[in-house]
Amino acid sequence: MKFQRIWSSALFLVFAIACAGPTVSGPTALNGTWRTAPENASPRGWYSRSLNFGPDGTFTSEFRSYGIYAGQPRDELSGYQRAEGTYRVEGERLIFAAARLVSWDRFYGATSPESIVEPYPYGSIFDDAHYVLLGSQLSLQYTTYPADAPVPTLLVYTRTD
């Protein structure tokens, strides 16, 4: 009788797990730093993007450009923009709340100070974002507005830590 009760409980547990919906990765699966592959910039520089998720629900999204100014070595930092704020996960959705924008540009001199704008001046970041996490790759699907119409956009990041 005891064996039958244990067997029934185990069978119920297996059935419940099998019938559950797909597993959705939560914030802990996202924690860490993610980077896109470098992309060439005209005429000879390049840029990359990174996204960092903290265990406390904070994020940073950074765009860095290298070697874009005349006479500048290809691997020398030209500038960056970094959005900082908080995020939350709702199923497959990522909801970002940017709080401030930090930027720097070599155009103003190698020793020029960072510019910090708070609150974040551009409204939402990664509007209507959904994500897929497969191994060490994070695909982020969101909406951009380059003209007057929304455009579906995809960024693929690779875990770096």
Image (cartoon, grey):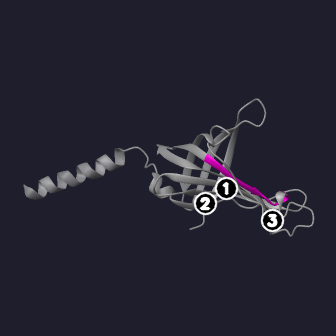
Amino acid type, residue under disc 2 in the picture: Trp
**Residue range of the region highlighted in magenta in the rendering:** 100-107
- Magenta stretch secondary structure, dominant: strand
**Compared to 89, does 80 lie above or below?**
below
Q: Nearer the viewer, mark 2 or mark 1?
A: 1
Which percent across, then down, holds residue 144? Answer: 70, 39
Q: Does the magenta run of residues contain 116?
A: no
Looking at the rendered structure, the secondary structure element under dot 2 is strand
Please state, as top left, top right, bottom left or bottom right, where the C terminus lies in the image: bottom right
Q: Nearer the viewer, mark 2 or mark 3?
A: 3
Decide: marks 2, 1 in contact (CB < 8 A)? no
The quarter of the picture where residue 152 lies is top right
Which percent across, then down, holds residue 7? Answer: 18, 55
Residue lying farthest left? 1
Judged left or right of residue 135, residue 21 is left
Residue at horizontal 48%, vertical 52%? Answer: 57
C-alpha distance separating marks 1 and 3: 19 Å
Q: Which residue is mark 2?
A: 34
Q: Which residue is mark 3?
A: 110
Q: Does the magenta run of residues contain 106?
A: yes
Front residue of 144 and 103:
103
Q: Which mark is residue 62?
A: 1
